[in-house]
Image: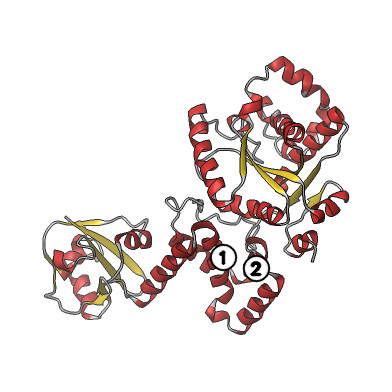
Amino acid sequence: MTLFEDLEWRGLVQDISSPELIDKLNKGGMTFYIGTDPTADSMHIGHYSSFLICKRLAKAGHRPLLLVGGATGLIGDPKPSAERPLITKEEVDKNIKGLTAQAKKIFGFEVVNNWDWTKDVNICDFLRDYGKYFNINYMLAKDHVKSRMDVGITYAEFSYMLLQAMDFYYLYKEYGCELQVAGSDQWGNITSGIELIRKKLDKEAYGMVMPLVTDSQGNKFGKTEGNALWLDENKTSSYEFYQYLINLEDSMIIDYLKKLTFLSKEEIEKIEKENNEHPEMRIAHKALAREIITDLHGEESYNEAVKISESLFSGDIANFTEKEILDAFKGLEPFTIKEDLKIVDLLVEGKICSSKREAREFVSNGSITLNGEKVTDLEFVVSKDKCLVNKYIVVRRGKKKYFIGIYE
């Protein structure tokens, strides 16, 4: 398949600005950019799904630029329903440093910052050199503006598309950048840049947008009870990534393999066949987790995530390192152990059981494990020499309910 045919097969093309772009994409050699505003110091899985298409273009011989919006981040791209809260220049600068380092490490992109060419443009020059090329009716017709007309949109947000158009114009002139790629929600901003280049330079630029990656209900991929899946391993561990990916809905998993991995058509079709024959083995889910985590954090981190998952399933956690303990039980509120305690007292003080009677029942029924070992002796004493790495006590009640204690 050609590059464009592969992108279409994967479901990664929602719209292109001109049919001419197809041949240009297949030939290679274009400079293109994708942008992100520095609203945090790490990208999340939503960025990854978009930026992967840039890696595909780079592998096909195109030159990628990542634009980090030091200027646009101070304004905020209009949300469909409400204005984004403003962040300070200090926050923006801090986030830019994190995003720049991360982009170079994960994606290998050259990074540019639109603050560099925006900071010295005064308001009169901005209005004369850019504002006069935009008709208000043209701007009002953009979807991201229309969606806000009922609740209202500030002039700052309304001007955002001019700033993004200015970015495309600048990159076209200074870097020979002919193409902007983004998620489908950026189509209006991209076409504004194409129009500006055509009007000011009489040159043709191009845009391509991909569908937003969502679940079967249309919710954005990676939204887990309001918490983002960060690409920074210190914010979201490989184990957390693994758990999220391995539990994705079955109906969407092949679609995710197409959009979020570099596996070939033949490899994905083989996985799909095996997955349909043995759905209980979650072959497709494991393949997705392997490809994404290895790409983001490396093979060692992926293997560690698998080890933690399999060890928790089997109950074999006695040899966990401190990092593995912290990754596996991140989010649990630990309880403190200040002295040696009988197992029944530990269960009550750690609020694992509501009463000594309930604690005795759980122990007698074989429902309590301590650091992976089942405890049935009501006189069993929990002491520091029984801790993992001389510090942690991990209690499992039943099959899935975990608690963690720290011995002081």
Q: Position of residue 403 (x, y in %)?
A: 29, 63
Secondary structure under the numbered disc 1 in the rendered image = helix
Q: Amino acid at mark 2?
A: Leu
Relative to 53, is 269 above or below?
below
Relative to 17, is 222 above or below?
below
Q: Amino acid at mark 1?
A: Glu
Residue farthest toward the bottom in the current orientation of the protein: 277
Colour setting: secondary structure
The residue that mark 1 highlights is 291
Q: Position of residue 85 (x, y in %)?
A: 55, 33
Q: Residues within 10 Å of mark 2 (few under 14, many from 20)?
A: some
Q: Position of residue 3 (x, y in %)?
A: 77, 60
Relative to 402, is 182 above or below?
above
The residue that mark 2 highlights is 263
Look at 74% across and 33% down and name the residue there.
165
The label number, if any, that marks residue 371 in the structure image: none
Q: Quadrant of the C terminus?
A: bottom left
Would you say 34 lies left or right of 6 here? Answer: left
Secondary structure under the numbered disc 2 in the rendered image = loop
Q: Mark 1 vs mark 2: which is more N-terminal?
A: 2
Q: Are marks 1 and 2 in contact (CB under 8 Å)?
A: yes
Viewer-side residue, 356 vs 129: 129
Q: Position of residue 381 (x, y in %)?
A: 12, 70
Q: Quadrant of the N terminus?
A: bottom right
Would you say 205 lies left or right of 81 here? Answer: right
Residue 387 visible from this viewpoint? yes
Residues at marks 1 and 2, CA–CA distance in whole angstroms: 8 Å
Viewer-side residue, 226 vs 178: 178
Which of the 4 image quarters holds residue 189? top right
